[in-house]
Structure formats: C-alpha cells, structure tokens
Amino acid sequence: MLEPRLIDDRMGGEPLYYFAQPKGILMRISDQVKRCVGFVGIRTPSGTDWGGTAFFVSLNDALRGDATLERKFPYMVTAKHVADKLNGSDWVVRINNRQGRSVEFEGTGTKWWEHPTESATVDSAVTPFPFEKELDVATLSDSLFATPELLEEYEIGVGDEVYAAGLFPKITDTSKNQPVVRTGHFAMMPDEKIPFAEFGMIEAYLIETKSFGGLSGCPVFVRHTVSLPLTEESDSPPVERLKRLYGGGSSYLLGSMIGHWRVPDESDPALKDALNLGFAAVVPMYKIIEVLHHPELVAMRKTVIEEERKKRAATTVLDTAFGETDVQKTPKGAEIPVPTEDQFIGDLKKASRKKN
C-alpha cells in the first residue's frame, strides 16, 4: 500500500503541505494551473464574444528590504494585442467562485501597463487586480517565475515538457470557466530575436503545441526533467547510469502565449484552424517581469507600503505608566515625572503619616 501523499511539489517554489492526502494530488497537472486563469470577452448586442485568456500573478515587495513590511501585489496579465482589443470596449473578465459558478467583473476603463521601453515588440500587458475572498483563484507567486537563472539552475531547455491553460472558444456556454490544457515540448530557445509577422523581431520562446484563437495571453508552464542515478549491478565493476524522467519535475511559469504560425493563406480557408504548423510563440517570463516592474507600478507599490508603514507608526505607543504627565530631566538627561498639585499633597500626607 502506498504511503499517503502529503506534500504537493508539482508547482516548483511553492510546495503545499497537508495533514491528509488531498483529492487529485496524484494527477499530472496541479489544479492551480486551471485556477489561475480567467476568460476575457467583449459585450456585443448578441452576447459576450469570448476571445482571450488572462492569468493572475503576485509580486512580493517590501520597503527598503524590510521584511516586516512585505506585501503581496496581485496582477492580471494578458497579451498586449488582447488588451488593445479591450481598450475602448465594454468588456468583462470571467472568473470562477468558490461555489462552483462563474462571476463576471466589468473591465471597461481599466488601464493596462505595457513594457516601459519595448511596447511595440513585447506582447504583454498587466493591470492590478484586487481579489475578493469568495473567488476560487490561484495567483502564481514570483517564486514560480522561470527566470533565465532558474532555467539554467534546473537545466531547462529544448525537449522539456510544456503545457498551457486557457480559453477554448468552441466551448463557452457553461456555468463556470472550463479551461483546456494543451501539452507539448520546448522546441526552440533562441539567443537572438526572431521574426513574428505582427510585431517584427521579438524575443520569444517556441513551443511545439497547437495554438488557436482564445489562448492568446494564457500562461505557459515548463516542467523540468528529473535525472535519477541507477547502478547496474550486473556490471563488474558496477556502472552508475542516469535515468531521465521527462515531465517528472516541478512546473514553473515560462511565459505567455501570443500566437502561432499558420499554413500559407492560399490554402483552403475552411481548414485554417486545422492547418496549423504546430508551433506557438511565447513571451518569456523575464520580459513580463520587466512589464511588472514598470516605473509607475513600482511607484504605486512603494506608496502602498509607505502608507502601511505610516499607519503602523501612528498606532505605536511607548510602554510607560506615566500617562500624559509632564516630565523633568536630571542633569544626566534622565526623565522624572512632574506630579500635579493633588498628587504632591497626597504623597506628602503619606510620607508624614505617623506609624502605629
């Protein structure tokens, strides 16, 4: 009989601990992957046109390195070309709640922040998103971000397993969000910019998986390969070999999907969804991090933390029993409380009282 699984390490950097084995912990992909996304759509006279995916992340920030003032700042992330479609439109984002139903949040008038210096070529946009307790949403902490340093540490690269979660526009008339998960492999990790028709030369990863309209802006995860040492006892002397478990490691947030390559336009238009070259472009997480560190967003976070510091300072008091009485100081600077007239007379009477 297998020992109960009490640690969920499928999402790297954020292991979850349990007293009893939870339902679904043995599944290949964590439920957090489906819970971190929302669907975005534009209201039309005939209904809502669901056309993109957003996902939610959180940044830990502190004031001047003061861990006691550390705060989590949640953001909604999507592709810039999706945000551009939403701007000026009557749009909504649909998220599941804890009762197993979806709720819609009005997004009209929302400000999106783009890359501070490369907005024309970085297809990513973010906006702060305050969460309510009744929402069934998993925010992806910055400990899950697949930075270049993390990719190097875990030797993540071409051939490793990837998967994306987002909107399937053919199935939207449901009572709650039903994200689809598409899997594939890391296909190209270029060390230079590559051409992409809509943006020109961009920094992007290539993954081998089918994409389609609706997945734009969705999160893409990569799972590193685990290598286990094996000793062949039949050899003399024993020879240590490695067994590689593809898809056996923890998952990290690789970036956001923006689009794919299609077959030439002269092909049958009826087959344009089916005739997909099978390669999708992903905005690397390090570029999205640069968007999240837009100077305006950094200033906003600092303001929030500074206000929190001032509130804490305003509620602090000195632990003294002297109350609001005046004080006098000795020649060496020690404070001595100055008694009131009533206190002085009372103390004098006590001192002159005869002993029985």
Image (spheres, rainbow, N blue to C red):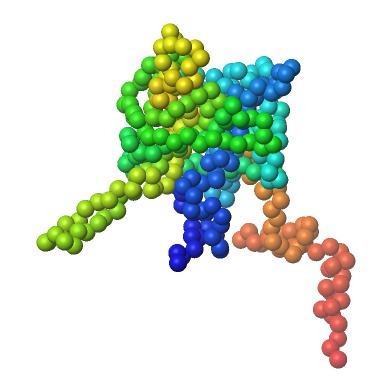
Is residue 58 among what the camera can see? no
Q: Residue 250, image x and y in percent?
A: 42, 47
Outermost top residue: 266
Instruction: Choose between 297 and 34: the one closer to the eye.
Output: 34
Q: Residue at x 69, y 61 (%)?
A: 319
Residue 31 found in image quarter: top right
**What count of labels does the image hold?**
0
Q: Residue at x 64, y 30 (%)?
A: 172
Left or right: 191 with respect to 48?
Answer: left
Instruction: Choose between 160 and 299: the one closer to the eye.
Output: 160
Q: Residue at x 86, y 72 (%)?
A: 346
Image quarter hosting the N terminus: bottom left
Outermost left residue: 236
Q: Residue 334, image x and y in percent?
A: 65, 61
Q: Residue at x 48, y 53 (%)?
A: 26
Left or right: 279 with respect to 103?
Answer: left
Q: Residue 33, image x and y in percent?
A: 53, 41
Q: Residue 93, image x and y in percent?
A: 66, 30
Image quarter hosting the C terminus: bottom right
Figure check: 19 above or below 173: below
Residue 47 found in image quarter: top right
Figure check: 6 above or below 218: below
Left or right: 175 with respect to 118?
Answer: right
Is residue 6 among what the camera can see? yes
Outermost bottom residue: 356
Figure check: 24 above or below 93: below
